[in-house]
């Protein structure tokens, strides 16, 4: 039996809420049908945004939403998505087999309205493949300029006198593939130009502090390619180290847990070895984060010292690691319609839980992470079928794990550890939050927590009697998180029985002594 001993004195670091962020894109039915139905729809909506999905998302308190892509960003022209909707151009979207005309009804204002309704900060990704520096600058001016200019007047005419205050800007997406099949060097050259061309929104008035601080997020490597990803980050930073350095705030790594060994196999059909393979697949991300964070630091360290008078030298450079896209990608998604639609079983809920715990444990190294994608695509939290909105078990994991935001991640010592049982704990003031994940598809597990001077206040459990089950339009609440029985307490020992394939969170109160 596994014994878990949290070290209450250890402080790995504060867990940034942004580790629970989201990614949406016009791909399959993520946007159209999933989030946007239009004002005239019979499906209840807030100015065209479907109410059930927005309400569900709002309840998660999403920190950041990344849009418009993904690959879609590589050819997206922001001007196609502003102005009267009936006058917007119709373009075509071939991304990942979407193969649909794009009416551009969901554009910048609609995205900002979504962010406003759910309380998220926007992350916009610019088009570095078919776009231009001028187009990028205009989008930034349109979104953020407070002073009266032609672009800010156009924004006001289109419904928003107030600037959108967008701070997070991705400089390209997956530059090694759909972003232009770039080399790290060719991307670094482009990056220099774009990153240096960001407009500034500072004010000369010291009282006018409500100004966006622009953050440049460089396109990082393909996390799924072990050799290439090392080369990418090394060579990109070496290239940036030549001559003067452009500003850089973060690098965006992408990692998908590919499940392609069984071809186009439906994502709800698997045996135990296939279950185990997917569970193990997601764990690789921990090493990748550690490797990439170290490479970023090495890259910054080899930047040459700056010359010239002190006053012109910038502060020492730092660059955060962010994971802009992550999630399970099952082979079956390639033949599903709408494109990349995936059902989610407890297998996906468990890898979602393990991945969030990887971020929590490595919160000193990774600053932000966006699940791919939030609605109707890949590792979704929300699925929609016409007028029905289904919350997947992944949604419940995000909901259960909210307690860790802004808490301090703790070191755990595991004794006689069962290799299918995973644990994570954090602390906020006098409360300790514990996650327990039994990844065994068929066997329950026993575990003990040693936490002197504590009492258990509450617990939740997410489990299913059938690991292949999922929430559907006919049975939307087949798998839902429920209150868990409190563990039996014997002094400072708490004893848990964890059903097969289950995710748990418990809250403990520490006594004052
Ligand atoms: O999330 C689906 C796609 O995966 C995104 O468009 C792209 O960035 C990635 O390859």
Image (tube, rainbow, N blue to C red):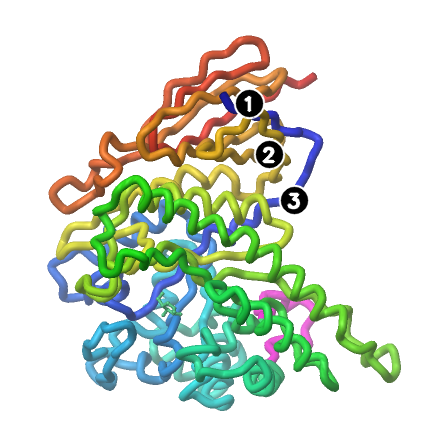
Please give the label number shown on residue 428.
2
The mark found on residue 351 in the picture is none
Q: Earlier in the sequence, mark 1 or mark 2?
A: 1
What residue is shown with label 1? Answer: 3
- Is 159 placed above or below 403 here? below
In terms of image quadrants, where is residue 126?
A: bottom left
Residue 503 seen anywhere in this rendered image of the structure: yes
Q: Residue at x 57, y 69 (%)?
A: 212
Residue at 66% x, 18% y: name it: 512
Image-based side of 418 in relation to 91, left or right: right
**Residue 5 left/right relative to 225:** right
Q: Secondary structure at mark 1?
A: strand
Asked whether 160 falls inside the magenta stretch, the response is no
- Mark 3, mark 2: which one is toward the viewer? 3
* Residue 167 locus on image (x, y percent): 54, 68
Regarding mark 3 in the picture, which secondary structure is present there? strand
Percent across and percent down for residue 39 are 19, 66
Disc 2 residue: CB within 8 Å of ligand 1: no
């Amino acid at each position: 039996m596994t014994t878990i001993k949290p070290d209450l004195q250890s402080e790995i670091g504060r867990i940034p809420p942004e580790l629970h962020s989201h990614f949406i894109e016009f791909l399959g039915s993520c946007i159209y049908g999933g989030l946007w139905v239009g004002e005239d729809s019979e499906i209840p909506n807030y100015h065209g945004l479907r109410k059930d999905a927005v309400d569900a998302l709002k309840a998660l308190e999403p920190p950041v939403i990344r849009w418009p892509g993904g690959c879609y960003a590589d050819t997206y022209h922001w001007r196609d998505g502003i102005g009267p909707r009936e006058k917007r151009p119709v373009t075509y979207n071939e991304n990942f087999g979407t193969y649909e005309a794009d009416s551009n009804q969901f554009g910048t204002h609609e995205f900002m309205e979504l962010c406003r309704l759910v309380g998220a900060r926007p992350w916009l990704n610019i088009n570095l493949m078919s776009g231009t520096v001028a187009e990028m600058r205009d989008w930034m001016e349109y979104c953020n300029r407070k002073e009266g200019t032609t672009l800010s007047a156009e924004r006001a005419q289109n419904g928003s006198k107030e600037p959108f205050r967008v701070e997070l800007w991705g400089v390209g997406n997956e530059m090694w593939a759909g972003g232009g099949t770039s080399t790290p060097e060719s991307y670094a050259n482009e990056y220099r130009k774009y990153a240096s061309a960001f407009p500034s929104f500072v004010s000369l008035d010291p009282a006018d502090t409500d100004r966006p601080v622009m953050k440049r997020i460089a396109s990082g490597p393909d996390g799924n390619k072990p050799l290439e990803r090392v080369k990418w980050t090394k060579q990109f930073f070496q290239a940036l180290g030549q001559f003067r350095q452009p500003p850089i705030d973060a690098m965006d790594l992408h990692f998908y847990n590919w499940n392609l060994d069984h071809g186009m196999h439906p994502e709800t059909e698997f045996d135990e070895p296939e279950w185990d393979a997917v569970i193990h697949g997601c764990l690789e991300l921990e090493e990748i984060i550690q490797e990439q964070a170290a490479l970023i630091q090495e890259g910054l360290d080899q930047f040459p010292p700056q010359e010239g008078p002190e006053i012109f030298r910038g502060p020492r450079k730092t660059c955060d690691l962010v994971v802009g896209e992550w999630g399970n990608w099952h082979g079956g998604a390639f033949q599903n319609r709408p494109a990349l639609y995936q059902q989610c079983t407890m297998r996906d809920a468990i890898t979602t839980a393990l991945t969030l715990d990887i971020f929590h444990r490595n919160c000193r190294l990774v600053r932000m992470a966006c699940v791919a994608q939030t609605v109707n695509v890949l590792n979704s939290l929300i699925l929609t079928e016409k007028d029905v909105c289904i919350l997947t078990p992944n949604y419940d994991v995000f909901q259960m794990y909210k307690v860790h935001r802004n808490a301090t991640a703790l070191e755990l010592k595991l004794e006689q550890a069962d290799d299918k049982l995973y644990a994570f704990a954090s602390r906020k003031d006098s409360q300790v939050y514990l996650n327990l994940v039994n990844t065994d598809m068929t066997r329950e597990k026993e575990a003990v927590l040693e936490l002197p001077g504590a009492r258990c206040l509450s617990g939740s459990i997410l489990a299913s009697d059938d690991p292949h089950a999922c929430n559907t339009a006919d049975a939307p609440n087949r798998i839902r998180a429920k209150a868990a029985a409190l563990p039996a307490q014997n002094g400072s020992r708490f004893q848990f029985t964890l059903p097969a394939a289950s995710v748990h969170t418990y809250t403990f109160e520490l006594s004052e002594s």
